[in-house]
Amino acid sequence: MNNTFSDNSQIATVSTFSELVQTNFKGEMNALCWYRNLDGDFNEIVARLSIKGNITEVYPEDLIALQLSEKGNTAREIILNDIQLLTDFGASPSLNLLKCYERDDEFDFISTDVYSFHVDRSPIATDTFLCTYHGAASDIIANSQAEQKILIPEIRTKLKELHDGPDEEFESFLEENYFDLHYQLNQDATPLNLGLGNLWRLAVDHPKQQVLPCIHRAPIENEGEYRLLLIC
């Protein structure tokens, strides 16, 4: 068990997939971790896959078609099993080979890309599941260590200047452009890296959610290294 995770009130650690999906979020806890030390050579899988553009979705049949060593095959079986577990649960997992995500550099005072700390929102009750098998892993932050960017006076002032409409439509403007989903860390904030091989379930902002949504971000990729990420 990873003490960094198990000693954190934001996170509950579990030892099975069943626990991961059946444990309820409560209080400050809005992230669940199925903590795993995975065997297998995930680097071999990444090396044998072909990337098209910055993001390529990898399907089970793509994995099955690879000629792999014993350790590479072990890694493949782990990924295929994770995909099957999530699919049987009713989720729609996507395995992505990533060079990088698209950047949002339209404004110098606020960003809405996934490299910015943000929360996910859904109109229906759902959660975000993710696992990084290879490459840089995502970060999360406690809600108490970050502030919604639209509440920061200087940013809010600039957003009001950007909004070309009546004052009563300003909040809708913020939501429609996803500005309200993004957060700025406090000076003493300490992000937590999600690590490799762990399968995470993160709370999403939706009408039935009982806890605050989990603030997270995609990592800056390591130079010359692809990420292999399962997400849904």
Image (spheres, rainbow, N blue to C red):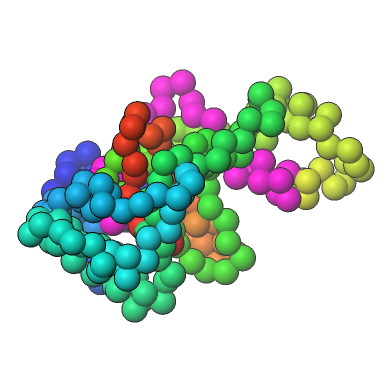
**Nearest the camera: 194 or 134?**
134
- Range shown magenta: 174-200
Left or right: 69 in relation to 86: left
Q: Residue at x 45, y 50 (%)?
A: 52
Q: Quadrant of residue 13?
A: bottom left
Q: Quadrant of the C terminus?
A: bottom left
Instruction: Give the residue at the far right of this rendering.
Output: 166
Residue 177: image location, x then y, percent: 71, 46
Residue 103: image location, x then y, percent: 57, 36
Task: Count numbered badges in the picture.
Answer: 0
**Nearest the camera: 15 or 132?**
132
Residue 86: image location, x then y, percent: 34, 70
Left or right: 149 in relation to 134: right
Specify whether residue 196 is painted magenta. yes
Left or right: 65 in relation to 105: left
Q: Residue at x 23, y 62 (%)?
A: 66
Q: Quadrant of residue 195?
A: top left
